[in-house]
Image (cartoon, rainbow, N blue to C red):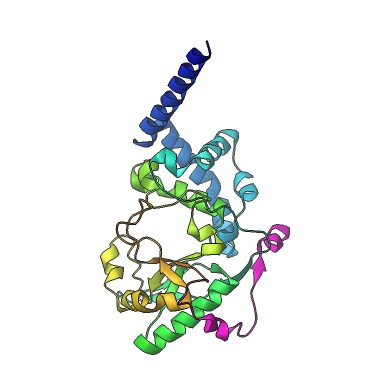
Amino acid sequence: MNRRLAVLRLVAIVAVWLAASAFSSKELSFEDQGLVQAFLTTAQPLITQRQADHTLALLSFDELYAPLPKEQRALLDWMRALTPQQLGHRSRPLGEPPQDTEFERLDGQTCALPDGRTQHLDTQYLPAEVYFAYRAMMADMQRDLGRHLLVESGYRSPAYQLYVLLSFLPKHGYSVTETTRHVALPGYSEHGAPQCQAIDFINQQGINGEDVPAEFEGLPEYDWLTRHAREYGFVLSYPRDNPWDTSFEPWHWHYEPNLPSHQQSVLRLGPAGPRSALTLSERSES
């Protein structure tokens, strides 16, 4: 009898695994695609407002869920329950940041595009230590090259990460598997993990490489990073043939403060002028 129960359990586990594998290898159903579009429409006023007050990167799950009807909340719950392993990926869980994490705010970043237009980047946030290491690195890049890199994407809360993931589904044919090769699940993204905080760089002419990685890889700024970034604690997260089943991303670097080659003097710049630091607990209280 016990042997029969064990066999039945094994059969059930295999069936669940096969069902998950079959689902993850194809796009969402037409009905679920409509649900994603409905969510994006419902969430848009909130996203627009948070963009206007420059705090979108600090969005909480409570705030994201608040305007949603039951079926859209269920969609988000389902997405949050997914793991990379279910989707055939290899990623490490990074969790959520502590509420007392202190962030520095980056405002006023602009790119001078080749066609003469000016691209204004959204306000970004970085953990304080990462921010000062970034500033030191860019000061030295500017000295060496006469140019530097901007932060196109820094800290993203797990809730904002979830929104970004859902917003990228249409671009990848509503395939959850394919989309999560380019956008991490919440809780698995270096952008939401101050202990290994990621920065997506963009150059001053608006080249970020996200559509054509070779464009960023060919920049003098990228070459400088490959030779010097470790001195400031920054490491390329997803080189070619990386073990995480993630596409090559020459623009995506993360911070490791304990690298042997890391210069502890990178904090020498320190805060200059008025501080704009903000903690997650302060954001939730405002």
Give the magenta-colored segment's residue range: 260-286
Q: Quadrant of residue 47?
A: bottom right
Residue drawn at 58 percent across, 65 percent down: 54
Q: Quadrant of the rendered structure where residue 42 is?
A: top right
User: What quarter of the picture does the C terminus occupy?
Assistant: bottom right
Furthest residue toward top: 1
The quarter of the picture where residue 175 lies is: top left
| Residue 133, position as x, y percentages in the image | 52, 77
Instruction: Please indicate, yes or no, whether residue 106 appears anywhere in the rendered image.
Output: no
Residue situated in front as seen by the camera: 180 or 57: 180
Total marks shown come to 0
Q: Is residue 131 magenta?
A: no
Horizontal side, residue 58 vs residue 238: left or right: right
The residue lying toward the viewer, choosing from 224 and 71, is 224
Q: Position of residue 5 (x, y in %)?
A: 51, 15
Image vertical order of residue 208 relative to residue 146, above or below: above
Above or below, comparing residue 36 to residue 197 in the picture: above
Residue 101 or residue 1, whichever sits in front:
1
Picture coordinates of residue 168 (x, y %)? 41, 49
Whether residue 263 appears in magenta in the rendering, the answer is yes
